[in-house]
C-alpha cells in the first residue's frame, strides 16, 4: 500500500513539471502570436508606422534639399493642423509635420521628432496642454510603436531623459486588450474600415486630413497653477538638448475649438499654461492664444482642423515663425491676471483691452515679417 502511494506521488510529481512546462509553452506561444499581430497586423499600428515613414522621408528630403528643417511635433492636433507643402510653396519654410497620436504621450512624441532633427534645425513643440498636464502613464501604444519601429528607446525618450528601456513592460504591452479585440470584431461584422484613418489621409509632408465629421464638445477652461514635475523635467531636458545640439526649440500652442461664450476664459487658461512653459523655452506669440471659435474649421474632434482650418493655421504659424516674436511671462501673467481682484477693486486693465492691444501689435509685426524672406 505504502509503495503504491509513493509510486503515485512520484507519478504526480513527474506530471506537474510537464503540465507546468505545457502551460508555459502555451503562454509563450500566445504572447508570440499576439505580439506578431500587434507588430504586423494591428490596423492602428500599421497606419502610424506608415505615418512615421512618410514623415521621416519628408524630413530627410528637406535636409538634403535645404540643409535644415523646421520639425513641428505634437499629438493629432498637430497632425491635422500644419501643412508642410503649403509652408514650403507659399511661405518658403521647410516644415515637416511629426504630429502623431495623443495616446503615445509626450515622451514618445518628443523622442520620435528629436530623432529626425539635425543641428541648425528648429524644433516646434506643439503638444497639447492637456497632455503636459496629465500623468505620463507609459502607454501601450507608445511601447507598441517603439517596438514596431525597432527602437524601444523611443518609448520613454531614453536618449533625452536617461530613462532605461523597460523591456518586460514593453514586451507585455504587445498584447492587444479585450477592448481592441471586440472593437475590431465588431468592425469586421459590420463591414466597417478596420481603422478610422487610412494612408490616403496623409500628405507627403506628414500633414493629415479627414473627411469625417462628428459632433464636438465645448472646452471647459480652468487656470493652470503649475506644471507637473514630470512635464517640467521633459521641457527642461528638451531645452538642454536644443542648446547642446544647436537646435532652436520653441513652443507653439495648438488651436482648439471653443464657443464664443467661453473664448476669453479659454484664452486666459492657455495664457496660464504658457507662462509656465515660457520658463523653459520661447513661446511663439499667437494672439489668438489657441482659441479658434470657427466650428466649420474642425472635423471629427475639437482639435482636428479641416483642410480649410489647417490652411489658416499654417499661414498663421508661418507668420509667427518669420516674425520670431515670443510671449514674455509678464505679458502672459497680465492676461491671466487676478480677475477677482480687478473686479472688486475696479482697477486694472480689462482682459479684452490687453488682448486687443497684443493683436494690433502682432498684426504690425506679422505684416513686416511677411515682407521679409524666410530666415529658417
Image: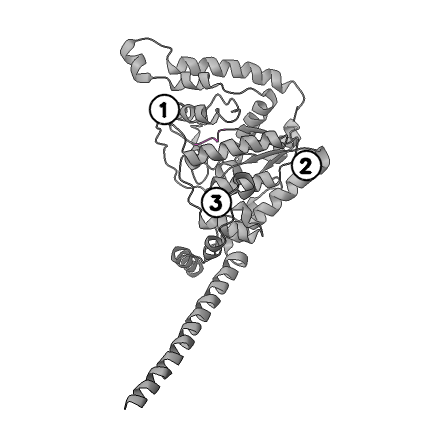
Q: Give whichever of 27, 192 is nearer the camera.
A: 27
For label 1, the residue is: 265
Query: Which quadrant is the N terminus positioned in?
Result: bottom left
Q: Which residues are magenta?
A: 252-256
What secondary structure characterizes most of the magenta part? loop
Instruction: Look at the picture and state if 117 lies above or below 190.
Output: above
Q: Earlier in the sequence, mark 1 or mark 3?
A: 3
User: For this rendering, which residue is in front, 36 or 194?
Assistant: 36
- Spot occupied by residue 290 in the image (x, y as percentages of width and height): 46, 27
Q: Which residue is mark 3?
A: 104
Q: Disc 2 to disc 1, how far (Cα)?
A: 39 Å
* Residue 62 tag number: 2
| Left or right placement of residue 327 versus residue 374 in this view | left
363 left or right of 2 in image: right
**In which quarter of the view is residue 117 placed?**
top right
- Mark drawn on residue 303: none
Q: Nearer the viewer, mark 3 or mark 2?
A: 3
Where residue 337 appears, as percent x and y from the top left, is 37, 17
How packed is label 3: few (under 14 Cα within 10 Å), some, or many (20 or more)?
Answer: many
Amino acid at each position: 500500500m505504502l509503495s503504491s502511494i509513493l509510486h503515485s506521488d512520484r507519478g504526480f510529481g513527474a506530471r506537474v513539471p510537464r503540465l507546468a512546462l505545457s502551460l508555459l509553452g502555451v503562454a509563450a506561444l500566445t504572447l508570440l502570436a499576439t505580439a506578431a499581430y500587434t507588430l504586423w497586423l494591428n490596423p492602428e499600428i500599421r497606419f502610424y508606422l506608415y505615418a512615421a515613414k512618410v514623415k521621416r522621408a519628408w524630413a530627410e528630403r528637406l535636409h538634403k534639399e535645404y540643409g535644415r528643417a523646421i520639425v513641428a511635433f505634437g499629438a493629432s492636433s498637430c497632425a491635422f493642423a500644419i501643412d508642410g507643402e503649403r509652408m514650403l510653396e507659399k511661405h518658403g519654410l521647410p516644415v515637416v509635420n511629426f504630429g502623431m497620436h495623443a495616446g503615445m504621450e509626450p515622451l514618445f512624441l518628443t523622442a520620435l521628432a528629436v530623432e529626425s532633427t539635425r543641428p541648425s534645425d528648429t524644433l516646434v513643440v506643439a503638444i497639447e496642454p492637456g497632455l503636459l498636464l496629465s500623468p505620463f502613464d507609459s502607454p501601450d501604444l507608445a511601447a507598441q510603436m517603439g517596438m514596431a519601429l525597432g527602437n524601444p528607446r523611443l518609448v520613454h525618450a531614453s536618449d533625452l531623459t536617461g530613462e532605461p528601456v523597460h523591456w518586460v513592460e514593453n514586451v507585455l504591452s504587445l498584447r492587444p486588450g479585450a477592448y481592441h479585440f471586440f472593437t475590431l470584431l465588431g468592425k469586421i461584422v459590420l463591414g466597417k474600415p478596420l481603422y478610422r484613418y487610412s494612408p490616403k489621409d496623409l500628405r507627403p509632408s506628414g500633414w493629415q486630413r479627414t473627411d469625417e465629421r462628428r459632433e464636438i464638445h465645448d472646452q471647459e477652461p480652468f487656470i493652470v497653477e503649475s506644471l507637473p514635475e514630470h512635464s517640467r523635467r521633459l521641457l527642461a531636458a528638451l531645452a538642454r538638448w536644443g542648446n547642446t545640439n544647436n537646435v532652436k526649440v520653441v513652443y507653439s500652442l495648438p488651436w482648439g475649438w471653443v464657443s464664443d461664450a467661453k473664448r476669453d476664459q479659454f484664452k486666459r487658461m492657455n495664457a496660464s499654461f504658457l507662462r509656465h512653459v515660457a520658463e523653459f523655452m520661447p513661446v511663439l506669440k499667437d494672439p489668438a492664444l489657441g482659441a479658434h471659435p470657427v466650428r466649420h474649421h474642425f472635423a471629427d474632434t475639437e482639435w482636428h482642423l479641416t483642410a480649410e482650418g489647417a490652411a489658416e493655421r499654417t499661414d498663421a504659424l508661418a507668420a509667427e515663425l518669420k516674425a520670431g516674436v515670443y510671449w514674455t511671462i509678464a505679458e502672459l501673467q497680465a492676461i491671466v491676471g487676478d480677475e477677482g481682484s480687478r473686479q472688486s477693486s475696479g482697477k486694472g486693465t480689462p482682459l479684452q483691452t490687453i488682448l486687443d492691444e497684443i493683436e494690433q501689435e502682432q498684426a504690425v509685426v506679422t505684416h513686416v515679417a511677411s515682407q521679409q524672406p524666410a530666415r529658417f
